Image: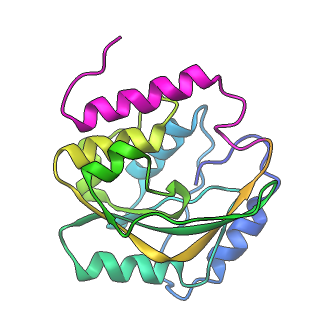
Amino acid sequence: MAVGPDAPFLKEALDSLEEQTFRDFEVLIQREPGIHKAWNVGARKASGEYLAIMDSDDVAAPTRLEAEVWEMDSDRELGVVAAWARCFGKSVRMVRHPVRITKSTLLLRNPIVNGACMVRKEVAMPYGPWRATPWIDYDLWCRMAAQGVKMLNIPKVLVFRREHDANDSRGRPLSRLIHGEVSARWQLLGRSPPD
């Protein structure tokens, strides 16, 4: 879990992890300059087979880890599993994505709620590290999908995503966000993005 200098919702996020029905996990909290660095340090330090990503301002449903671990254990080819999310706070909405994630799905949009995903460490690490792009997660998913890594969404709300003014993508110039998204799509096609 990447945590910035001001983490007013961290206790609530950690409390939701204490309520998990799946109990065999460790929580790594990383305070690094840049979310990509925090995720990379955490991934290297993690001792488990799977890496569950969670934002420090979100809340996990009690069965989140159990459901994601079950999917990973059931299909050894699966590299990434995610779930739907319900947003609350500044906006209230559901985030639903297709169950089956393909290159075509990724070309249209990022179909993975990053704070609701789990990756198989041995599959993700060769495509890592997470890079300092405006679309940190989407960049990695596209690189993995370009190499045929299997991904899916559980069609169930397993994370409650808090939306507020300090969310990571808010306040970034639109041109940087678009450039990051386009760069990720080029990688999905197996090409280097143009400068």
Residue at x 62% of width, y 78% of height: 61
Asked if residue 165 lies left or right of residue 142, the reply is right
Residue 19 is covered by the magenta coloring? no
Residue at x 51% of width, y 84% of height: 23
Quarter occupied by the C terminus: top left
Residue at x 54% of width, y 84% of height: 63
Task: Estimate the x, y position of residue 121 in percent, counting from the top left.
Answer: 31, 58
Please say if 26 is above or below 45: below
Residue 180 is covered by the magenta coloring? yes
In this rendered view, identify the residue nearer to me: 161 or 131: 161
Residue bounds of the magenta highlight: 166-195
Please say if 191 is above or below 60: above
Asked if residue 18 lies left or right of residue 49, the reply is right
Q: How many marks?
A: 0
Residue at x 25% of width, y 83% of height: 74
Task: Estimate the x, y position of residue 139 in percent, counting from the top left.
Answer: 38, 38
Asked if residue 86 lies left or right of residue 119, the reply is right
Please say if 193 is above or below 46: above
